[in-house]
Image (spheres, helix red, strand yellow):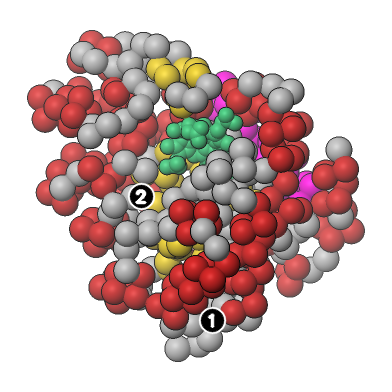
Amino acid sequence: MSTLNSHSNIAEHSIGLKDTASNSSIMLACRQQACSYTPIWLMRQAGRYMTSYRKVRSKAEFLELCKNPDLATEVTLLPVDELGVDAAIIFADILLILEPLGVQLRFAAGEGPIIDNPVRTESDVYNLQQVSVADPLSYVFDTIRKSRRALKSDLPLIGFSGAPFTLAAYLIEGGKVGNLARTKTFMYKYPDAWSHLLSLLTNACIEYLSEQIKSGADIVQIFDSWLGYLSPADFNQYVLPYSKMLVATVKDLAPTIYFGTDTCSLLDLIKQTECQVIGLDWRADLSLEWEKLDYQVAIQGNLDPIVLLSDRENIDRQTKRILAQAQGRPGHIFNLGHGVLPETPIDNVKYLVELVHKLGRTTKQ
Ligand code: CP3
């Protein structure tokens, strides 16, 4: 538990507002306020590319790890210690919320998530349990409380959830998502069952994120990883009302980051959710897209994770390019355009964090 101890700083909890997470660099960026350096955290910052993660993981299967608040807290804190990132993200998974609904979820080595009883018919949707998720997911809130206590008070803790659409996609596809043919066919063919499913998932996400914030999450990120498979018209018709409902509830409780991949044609619609931050994947031209959004939201992103598999020269060049695209505007949170890949050399990740801290600075426009 040396990791935990190195973060324990009980005295800091009693210091004034200046040292609380609400005035941290990332919180300033969420509010589009100037900051002396560009804050950085990384999606999947705790994962298999770390020797320390693999060591903890060797003690437990992935789902067991998520459900063990002591181990999950230890893993949550690893990147803060080893990389010096500006936020911690709770160690969990977007699919955990499906279990209380009656879904049998497992993670097979090398295969990713598998759902043994996917939703394929209308009656499968109506058979999902409409239960409160707070009790069955209490292990996540325990991890949040433990992590919050262990972190320095000025370091924000990010909670997260899948978005209703991406969760529905996993439920219907049953695991690996391809071109989402099953999900979209279901959506077109059974609009009533689709809206029942999305409402049920939205309610579960609202309860889950609200409870995470109550337990100590300072910021929340909504992962809509597969949104880019939808046309703007379909997003607007079949999904946006639910995303709006979810963000409307949580955004006043904590700054909310909405992330999806391949979303360049959807950003205007994502903005309508009124989330404080939009996460861009690496396909997006940050300066162009931010301008199109009239700089009315903060932006997170968007280095291609594969850049971290290359050399320092390329990391330098691409990082400088992204910082230049952000133009020092307040409201840029540096991140990757998707999660850190398992084969990434950790030294490159450390190098990136130092580089962004050294070069990035936001100023009043
Ligand atoms: O970012 C973090 O460090 C926090 C932890 C976190 C995990 N999953 C841990 C994890 C977060 C935020 C997630 C989100 C998640 N999970 C998403 C959204 C982000 C994205 O990638 O688009 C999705 C789609 C999932 C579903 C999921 N979980 C998949 C597809 C996989 C398999 C792929 C893989 O990398 O193995 C997982 C497993 C998973 N989730 C691992 C980790 C660390 C690897 C598990 C292991 O140790 O074997």
Residue 332 visible (yes or no): no
Q: Quadrant of the C terminus?
A: bottom left
Residue 30 x %, y %? 51, 66
Q: Are marks 1 and 2 in contact (CB under 8 Å)?
A: no
Q: Which residue is painted at 32% across and 69% down in the image?
A: 285
Q: Which residue is painted at 71% across and 60% down in the image?
A: 84
Q: Which residue is mark 1?
A: 362
Q: Is residue 135 magenta?
A: yes
Neighbourhood count class around disc 2 (C-alpha, 10 Å): few under 14, some 14–19, many 20 upward: many
SS at mark 1 in the image: loop
Q: CA distance from mark 1 to mark 2?
A: 25 Å
Q: Is residue 90 magenta?
A: no
Give the quadrant of residue 159: top right
Residue 187, labelled with which disc?
none
Residue 3 x %, y %? 82, 45
Q: Which residue is mark 2?
A: 260
Residue 117 x %, y %? 36, 11
Q: Nearer the viewer, residue 253 or 273?
A: 273
